Amino acid sequence: MTKFLLSLHVLAAIIAVGPITVAASMFPPSARKALAEPGSERAVSAVRLLHRICRVYGGVGIAVPVLGFATAMSMGVLKDPWLIVSMLLTTLAAMVLLALVLPRQEEILEGLGGDAGVGGDVEAGGTRTTTGPAATTATTATTATTATTATTATKTTKVTKATAQLAMFTGVFNLLWATVTILMIVRPGSTTGA
């Protein structure tokens, strides 16, 4: 039974955690690319897909610690320090994913979605030299364009900063999982003959 549980635990880790680490790592550069290509639905769709992968596989990833706990009980190693540290790091990785990575991905997606319609179509003749109501309309259009450009620049700066911060949190998440994987393989102080 132990080998069966261990096999399920390892498969769950590969199938669930692997896609999260890859998709989460790809998200910041893809978001920057979408930001560099305003109006590109394809670029925004790629970012949405990466977020969906992180969210869905994050839910599936619950199986990893559950199966790991069952395996540890079966092996009788629940009190081993390497396992306790692994469980703590797994909990920390889950908290980083749920509290820092996924919410920031959603914020960035909102920022990208907000940029899609910004800018509108302003007539090239927005600076006509006429008098009366037409001149007022042209001046209003020019002012609106300037305000929209300023808003877009502010959003771009915010999204760019958010992607840098997200990349850092994603790196921490990936480092935690790498550490857990190494602990699971090396098992320092284990008496089970690793």
Image: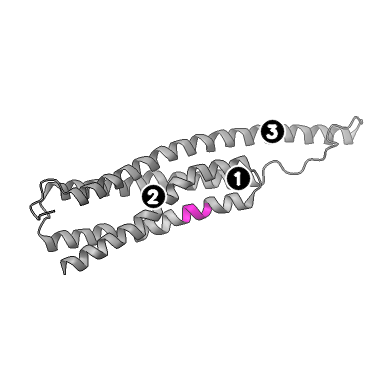
Q: Which residue is mark 2?
A: 21
Q: Nearer the viewer, mark 2 or mark 3?
A: 2
Left or right: 115 as drawn, with respect to 85: right
Q: Is residue 177 magenta?
A: no
> Image point 33% across, 58% down: which residue?
14
Within the image, what quadrant is residue 56 found in? bottom left
Residue 39 at x, y percent in the picture: 66, 47
> Image point 47% across, 52% down: which residue?
51
Residue 101 at x, y percent in the picture: 41, 45
Within the image, what quadrant is residue 2 found in? bottom left
Q: Which residue is mark 1?
A: 114
Residue 9 at x, y percent in the picture: 25, 61
| The one of 40 and 19 positioned closer to us in this rendering | 19
Residue 11 at x, y percent in the picture: 30, 62
Cα–Cα gap, marks 1 and 3: 15 Å
Q: Which residue is mark 3?
A: 147
Left or right: 178 as drawn, with respect to 115: left
Q: Amino acid at mark 2?
A: Thr
Q: Report the quarter where the N terminus lies.
A: bottom left
> Image point 27% across, 60% down: which residue?
10
Q: What type of secondary structure mainly makes up the magenta span?
A: helix
Specify the segment rendered in magenta: 48-52
Q: Is there any visible trace of residue 39 in the rendered image?
A: yes
Q: For mark 3, does the 10 Å Cα neighbourhood hold few (<14), some (14 to 19), or many (20 or more) residues?
A: few
Q: Amino acid at mark 3?
A: Ala
Query: What residue occupies the far left of the structure in this picture?
Result: 191
Secondary structure category for the residue under label 2 = helix
Ranked by sequence position, the earlier of labels 2 and 3 is: 2
Query: What residue occupies the far front of the structure in this picture?
Result: 193
Instruction: Look at the picture and state if 176 lies above or below 158.
Output: below
